Image (cartoon, rainbow, N blue to C red):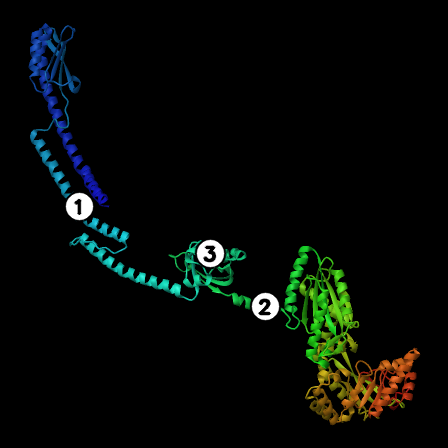
Amino acid sequence: MTHSVESRFIAIISGALLVVVAPLFTLFLALSSQQASQSIGEHVDVVMNSNTQALGKPLWDLDLDSISQVAQMMLLDQMVHAVQINDTTGKLNVFEADPGAPELNTLEARSQTVIYRSLQGPREVGTLTIYVPVASWFSGLHQIEFAFISIFIIAILTVFGAAVFGNRTMVVRPLTRLTAAIEATRRLGSRHHVDWRSADEMGRLAKSFNEMQLLLEREEKELKRAHQQTIEIYNLTPAMLFSLTAGDTVAAVSDYWLLATGYQREEVIGQHFSDFLFAADRASFENRRRHAMAQCVTIEITVRFLCKNGRILDVLIAEADLGATTTHLAGSLSVMTDVTELKQSEFRNHQQAITDHLTGLLNRQGFEAALDRHIVEADRMATQLACLFVDLDRFKAINDNHGHAAGDLVLQEFVVRLQPMLHETDTVSRLGGDEFAIVIAGPDAESRSADLCQQIIDMFESPFRIEGTGIRLSASVGVAFYPQHAATAAELLQKSDLAMYARKRDGKNGARVYDPAILTRTREKAEIESDIEVGIAANWFEAHFQPIVGMGNGIPVGFEALMRLRHPRKGLLPPAPLVSVAEENGSIAAIGNLILEDAIANLNRVSRLPGLGNTYVAVNFSPLQFERCLPARLTRMLGEGGILPARLVIEITEAVLMHDDPEIRRTLSELHDLGCRIALDDFGTGYSSLSYLNRFPVDIVKIDQSFVQSLLGGDTDLERKSRMLIEGITTISHQMQCKVVAEGVETAQQRQQLMQIGVDYAQGYHFSRPREINDLLADFSGHPSKASLAS
């Protein structure tokens, strides 16, 4: 640096001399040279003019001695170094030169014609040529001028030397010391100071540099202390910290990271971080920034990390991009958290979430996900899928009669029997309760599904042994195929479900393959549900009355209130589909309450007719209607209508009694104590038991119409058995102090036989169809003979 500054200073001074002094000196020399040249020229002209006149006569006379004498006289002039004289005839050529004269080619030759003035006039007789020195830069200078020039040059050199010395002393030397201090600071790392004191700018520069060094030294100590503290925090933090460069190579790792992974620091620094990850996760780690949000400073990703001992950790990496928060840092700082146990817990929770705890099979959620995967695979392989929807028939009775623990054992036993029938590619699930679903995949799905359906049905030929008791069940199976019947997993499961319910409606214990007609019936059911919902809200339900008459005289003793729905557009809808759907979706209770209110109101109107003031109304009750508040509500309704409780007969079926619900038993007892009578409907079918007559307060037994219609069915054996059953029911009922009503009497012959058996009352088309209340009132009003419906 010293040489550079001094050289530049010398260059500046030299440039100034060249720019200012040199042109002036050159101009001075040029002017001196011009003046000298002019002076020489004038002197030479005088010499030549005077001598040409002196040579005129000798040249005319060809006087060689005179000519030579003139030439020698001319050489005496210090300006003339050589003389040459020629005549015009060429006979005479005189050349005289100074012995010390330089070469002629270095001299300037000047010539002039010699004229002789004769009597005949001026005549050219020859030529005079003299050789004089050429005027130079310094030829016009005198000795005094050379002295002044020398003094000027010495002065310039003195100033130049003083400037260089002053620059070296006042500038270069402090700069050299400053440079040495900087170089020492750079090489040795310590803060060196400049040993220079002066009151000028260099002194102030040295002082400022020394103060800056002191400040930097303090800040450097603080930075070292902060850096050391940062390193200690980095290493002592109980978290797996690591830093990456912009190229994802490891720049630093904490001690805790090394302790947790088992590596040494030299084994990881400079290595690409993805090299320590499970091979399948490396691509996702390298593409993590591509999938991160644009404004997201922190990136989180879960990958599998390979420890030095071969152990695989599930780790959550939270990475902060340093370049996104500051412009002078590149790379990232990350925290790696071991989430292996959390992932395992999540896996266990997921397995629990998709697994049925009782059977170990997939639950509905898991099955739907598996079905989606099967569909993707079936599309890829262009094969079929068969979905079997299995429902155990009469399973609810097991829970009710034997307890839920027994029901659970039956379900487990069913799964044990089912497993050997399945292939490895099949998927089975317990959807809930007693419903199961099975997926069969492969090109033979259709044939295998038929075989599996038959195997499942045959499975139930052997009773289930639960706590030493044999329990017999059956199954209803619905089958749907992909892609013939459905385009999605949900639709395939729904279609198999619809096929199963169609099998149940057809009598249970069998299999049914889905067909479009099932969907039609399902839509019809949905339409009925809609009609029921709107009908309840708009009060479209009516209680139609069918008379119950004395067997002998045909006089009405009561009426059965039968539910009807009068649709404003469809008219009067048949009751059977309505009841079936209402019992299934639970709306039967709301419908029953509407019919009860309408029946009591209609009985109040009928009571005003002659001969019908003591008739009763029999109303069918669903199990859902037996609420704790039912006795109080009936008391209020009967009181408002002025109806005695004995005129209300509550008809119940085995569905009400078979559960032996204490709440229902208590409610029935309260109603009976209130004065209402209890009728047991459809007696002799289903699971009807004579014990009902003993355990419940029954007043009336209604014989199912199937027995009545079999009295004259043409089958002698069936007629005989039906008569015996009716006789037995009638005898036992009378012994239990119960009245007997025969349902479905359609002919006089049936009536006659029932009279012989001793049945008390009858109802059926032989006497009257169910009638809308206004039509019924119109028939009986003003026609006392109508009071007797005997044929």
Spot occupied by residue 333 in the image (x, y as percentages of width and height): 42, 60
Name the residue carrying label 3. Answer: 273
Badge 3 density bin: few <14, some 14–19, many ≥20, Cα 10 Å: many
Disc 1/disc 3 C-alpha distance (Å): 58 Å
Q: Observer-nearest residue: 289 or 387? A: 387
Name the secondary structure under disc 1: helix
Earlier along the polypeptide chain: callout 2 or callout 3? 3
Residue 670 in view here: yes
Asked if marks 2 and 3 touch (Cβ < 8 Å), the reply is: no
Name the residue carrying label 1. Answer: 168
Disc 2/disc 3 C-alpha distance (Å): 31 Å
Asked if marks 2 and 1 touch (Cβ < 8 Å), the reply is: no
Q: Quadrant of the C terminus?
A: bottom right
Disc 2/disc 1 C-alpha distance (Å): 85 Å
Q: Amino acid at mark 2?
A: His
Spot occupied by residue 614 in the image (x, y as percentages of width and height): 81, 93
**Above or below for 44 versus 445:** above
| Foreground: disc 1 or disc 3 | 3
**Above or below for 438 versus 705:** above
Name the residue carrying label 2. Answer: 350
User: What is the quadrant of residue 640 in the picture?
Assistant: bottom right
Residue 679 in view here: no
Earlier along the polypeptide chain: callout 1 or callout 3? 1
Q: Amino acid at mark 1?
A: Arg
User: What is the quadrant of residue 500 in the picture?
Assistant: bottom right
Q: What residue is rendered at 76% in x and 86% in y?
A: 599
Left or right of 223, for residue 52: left
Q: Amino acid at mark 3?
A: Phe
